[in-house]
Amino acid sequence: MGLPIVQSETRIRRSRSTRWRATVLALVHLVVAAHITHWLIRGRTLTPVEPSEAAAFANAGIINTGLVFFALTILLTAVCGRFFCGWACHLVALQDLSRSLLEKLGRRPKPLRSRLLAWVPMIAFLYAFVWPAVRRFWLTDTLAVTGSELTTTEFWATFPGWVVGGLTFLICGFVAIYFLGAKGFCTYACPYGAIFGVAEKLSPFRIRVTDACAGCGHCTAVCTSNVRVITRRCATSGWWSTAAA
């Protein structure tokens, strides 16, 4: 079912936030580079500020920087809305770059819409973070904190090698974009996005579609995250009913 669009003489324009978001994502990468540089110079630095590091708590009760960062990000998402996915994630920058390069090559990725695949991120989150905690509780009868690792001398210990890392970037970037559409990895694979989506429902500041929507299709046209803004007119009341899909 296609998106109903109200005829309008307004020309579809690029999102005003595109350059601001690109600038913020570039700054995020500079911060990451500074983190790595600090480790190379000093030999010790904060443990990786990466949500996947939170699995150390689920598996062994270890508190690290990644766990603190992930917990704070979930909390902020519940308050401010889903800001991290669009404005702070390095993989979003990778996907934007991949999409841009593919479009320059004449390939405009078309989004794949699948209700079945949409469950993959939540399944991945449960497998990576919830199941290990359930297993630890089953085997040890406790979920107590066993220690903390807020700094490390082995910064790359939990990261894959260059080959696996390169394949990961290739698959999460170009392959996912080519077959699944812009933000394909975010939509159908990212376990962090699953919990952010749940937390966002609590946010009083989340972006919502209201009855002020004129159904022009502008939001859908400029969105790079495959969000469809669907506008339906109620046959009985004549009011617009709007939703994001």
Image: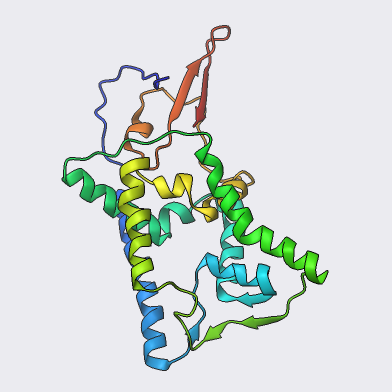
Image spot of residue 59 (x, y percent): 66, 70
The single residue placed furthest to the top in the displayed view is 236
Q: Residue at x 57, y 64 (%)?
A: 70
Residue 128: tell me if it is visible: yes
State the count of labels. Answer: 0
Image spot of residue 7 (x, y percent): 31, 17
Q: Quadrant of the N terminus?
A: top left
The single residue placed furthest to the right in the displayed view is 141
Q: Quadrant of residue 140?
A: bottom right
Image spot of residue 53 (x, y percent): 55, 70
Name the side, left or right, on which 147 lies relative to 34. right
Image spot of residue 149 (x, y percent): 60, 82
Residue situated in front as seen by the camera: 22 or 163: 163
The single residue placed furthest to the bottom in the displayed view is 42
Residue situated in front as seen by the camera: 155 or 175: 175
Q: Residue at x 35, y 76 (%)?
A: 33
The single residue placed furthest to the left in the displayed view is 105
